Amino acid sequence: MNKPGDSALIRKCKNGDQRAFEALIIKYQKPVFNAAYRMLHSSEDARDVTQTVFLKAFENLDRYDPNFRFFSWIYRIALNESIDCLKKQKRLGSLDREPESDTGNAEDAASAEQKSDIVQMALMTIKQEYRSVIVLKHFLDCSYGEISEILGIPEKKVKSRLYTGRQLLKDALKKSRLH
Amino acid sequence: MSIDQKYIELIHADIDGELSDAQCSELNDFLEKNEAGRTLRDELSSLCQTISSSAPLDPPPHLKHVLLESIKQEHARTSLADRLMAIFSVPTLRYAGAFAAGVLLTLAFIGSDQASQHAFDDLTGLVGTISENVPEPIFDDGSMNLTIKEIAGIVNLSNAGPILVLDFDLASHDPVRIVADFSDQDVWFNGFAQLESDGTSVLAETGQVTLYTEGRRRFAMFLHNTGSNEATINLTFYAGEALIHEGELRFTGQK
């Protein structure tokens, strides 16, 4: 089932109504940007990915299957684009680049922003297949069923990846003494 | 003490709000009698709170505008392509079009003076027809040729009424950041379009636009020039943090 209003907006988009697509951009730019940022830990890359996601969605709207929820479709594009971006970075050997912000020692990490940075740093240490599930669950509030639809994997696998991802994240946070 | 996998899954599902009533009471019965289970639940619950406490980030304020402009450009491009496809679906016109293209291609070969005697070591293949091979950058008011090792090609400034068009035809092996600065002038960013590629990104701020490019790229940036007055666009090129080139393009008033 689509989120309220999505089906009508998509129908209008398919009929060439650009204002309807604008409404979809307003509705989804924030979650798409956040998903990309959590996957990439770079606002710049997240912005590029968001731009590509909406362009691809616009170009391929005719191929969108209304049996799937629009947000599943667009989140799936966002994750795939983020993964492509990570692969590209790996090819270019830029994985060693400095993260966007340095968190310092967690002992004096008083502010929520610093905590958020530490969580993000820990997130970047785990494999992208686990990270994707954590991002969808904790940052986009998706259910097991929705994650399964977005990633195209069975729910059982979603759960297993989520549990393993959390364990890995917990270990990473322990190292940073946040958890 | 180890915990049965079934209860580990139930604890996760409980935290995720995915338990049925029956599963919920089964888990509660288990937790009442099992301290290790309670510890695991508390730890997981605390971990999930920590993760979820990260507030969602706001996208850059200009992002919506950039997205809408990209969509508009894409829409215009596909509409044109559709119209051309419709025209050239008529066999006679298709053959006439192919013939005309052949004639143009032949004329281009005859008239071209692209054979370089001093081609760059590593950019020749990428640059193709876009760059004259000159040792130093050449500036004139509305055009900038780049022949440095990090980037080669041409940037042209033209106008269409109040719209200034910066046409970039560039090639680089590595990522290059281009900052177009037009602050202190009555000019503002009006749009961006790219041809035959999707690898260039744009960040528009007040009085300044930053473009990121890599490889062979053709793209255009549109600026609204109120009153079609004189305007100067400063262009600065960076490879990583290193400044590799700077110059300016000048529009001398309504043409």
Image (spheres, rainbow, N blue to C red):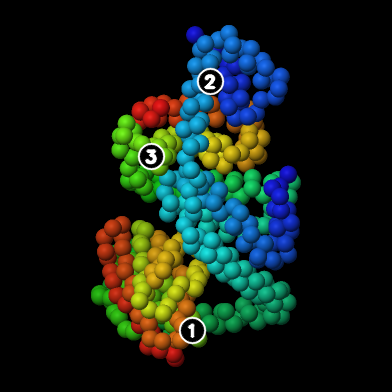
As displayed, is residue B246 above or below residue B41? below
Residue A31's disc number: none
Q: What kind of residue is marked 2?
A: Arg
Looking at the rendered structure, the kind of residue marked 1 is: Pro
Residue where numbered disc 3 is placed: A111
Image quarter hosting the N terminus of chain A: top right
Q: Residue B152 vs residue B190: left or right?
A: left
Q: Nearer the viewer, mark 3 or mark 1?
A: 3
The chain letter under disc 1 is B
Mark in front: 2 vs 1: 2
Q: Residues within 10 Å of mark 2 (few under 14, many from 20)?
A: some
Name the chain letter of the residue that bears numbered label 2: B
Quarter of the picture containing the C terminus of chain A is top left
Q: Secondary structure at mark 1?
A: loop
Residue located beneath label 1 in the image:
B162
Question: Is residue B184 in view?
Answer: yes
Give the residue pinned by disc 2. Answer: B41
Residue drawn at the location 36% of the way across and 67% of the way down:
B179
Amino acid found under the numbered disc labelled 3:
Ser
